[in-house]
Amino acid sequence: MTSTATLTRPPVRTRGSYAGMLPAVSSAAAFGLSGSLARSLLDIGWSPAAVVAVRLGGAFAVLLIPSLLLLSRIGLPSGRQATRMLAYGVVAVATAQLCYFSAVQYLSIGVALLLEFTAPVLLIGWHWAQNRRRPAAGVLAGATLALVGLVLVLDLTGGLTLNPIGVAWGLGAALCLCAYFVLSEDDGQTQPVHPLLLTSAGTGVGVTLIIGLGLAGVLPLSANAGQTVVAGQTISWLLPVTLLILVSAVFSYLAGIIAVRRLGSSIASFVALSEVIFAVIFAALLLSQQPTLQQLIGGGLILAGIAVVQRGGAAQQIRAARASRS
């Protein structure tokens, strides 16, 4: 029987290296595509909760049989693994999206996203407190650079609405995003959950919770079949739904988990900031929402910040490894 640790634990040399950048950037791009696809469904009368439910439910259906086949090979998860899978579904998948959609009821999308993407800074502080080791200067400098770029990309000049309830929901989304990275990470202390099982359980638990809240009347669930417009072309609603499920759910979550395990939660969270860049690009290509010069400059700062954080994190890990051997 093949152990879960053998299937999921990457070689030590890849952690914090460029080996994790491809899945991290790919995951961010897939997540960034979801906004434009969801918008095409919202425009024909879908509610946000219905989009989330179909996205997660479809992903769970796609992953169910492969997950059962995997379980037949490696055996059932342990109690700790099952708890981690449940927490991932409730906090990192369902509650994260619930907090974000609740935030945009009181705040602009830009402000809500800015609050949610304070997660990388919160993670730096959490790891700092946990390890009692100050982050490298390069990590702090890159974090500052990336967050300045994030503010520019989100273009908050249209007037800020800082409703305290919305701010609370936005910060809740940030904490859930932190949980997504921490629960995805292989901390080396407990046996990790295979990415396929974690994604399958997360989407299954997430869709169950979202549908439960919908049936209880907390979240409106409404969907319509028909034609929608993407990139100036009239298409069936089935195409954006299919892409939401396969690309922006199945692929994005799987690639994201792999990236976190190779880069670590802190660095992976900063690479995830590139999601807003991809969101702007896809909005321009699919929704004809052209980026401003300010957003382009901000995108460049985010990319520069990610590069600085990655280099600073890698250098810090090398120094820590040398110190442990001496």
Image: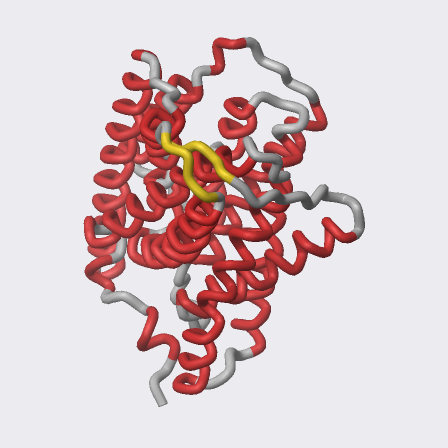
Expressed as whole percent of the image width and height from the top left, the position of residue 194 reads 41, 70
Viewport quadrant of the C terminus: bottom left
x 49%, y 57%: residue: 183
Name the image quarter holding residue 136. top left
Frontmost residue, 251 versus 184: 251
194 displayed left or right of 19: right
Q: Is residue 294 visible?
A: yes
Above/below status of 254 relative to 3: above
Expressed as whole percent of the image width and height from the top left, the position of residue 234 reads 41, 34
Above/below status of 28 relative to 77: above
Above/below status of 122 relative to 89: above
| Callout count | 0
Frontmost residue, 95 versus 216: 216
Q: Is residue 320 visible?
A: no
x 47%, y 49%: residue: 238
Viewport quadrant of the N terminus: bottom left
x 44%, y 41%: residue: 34
295 displayed left or right of 128: left
Work out which residue is located at the far right of the displayed protein and give it: 216
207 displayed left or right of 77: right
Frontmost residue, 92 versus 293: 293
Expressed as whole percent of the image width and height from the top left, the position of residue 295 reads 34, 18
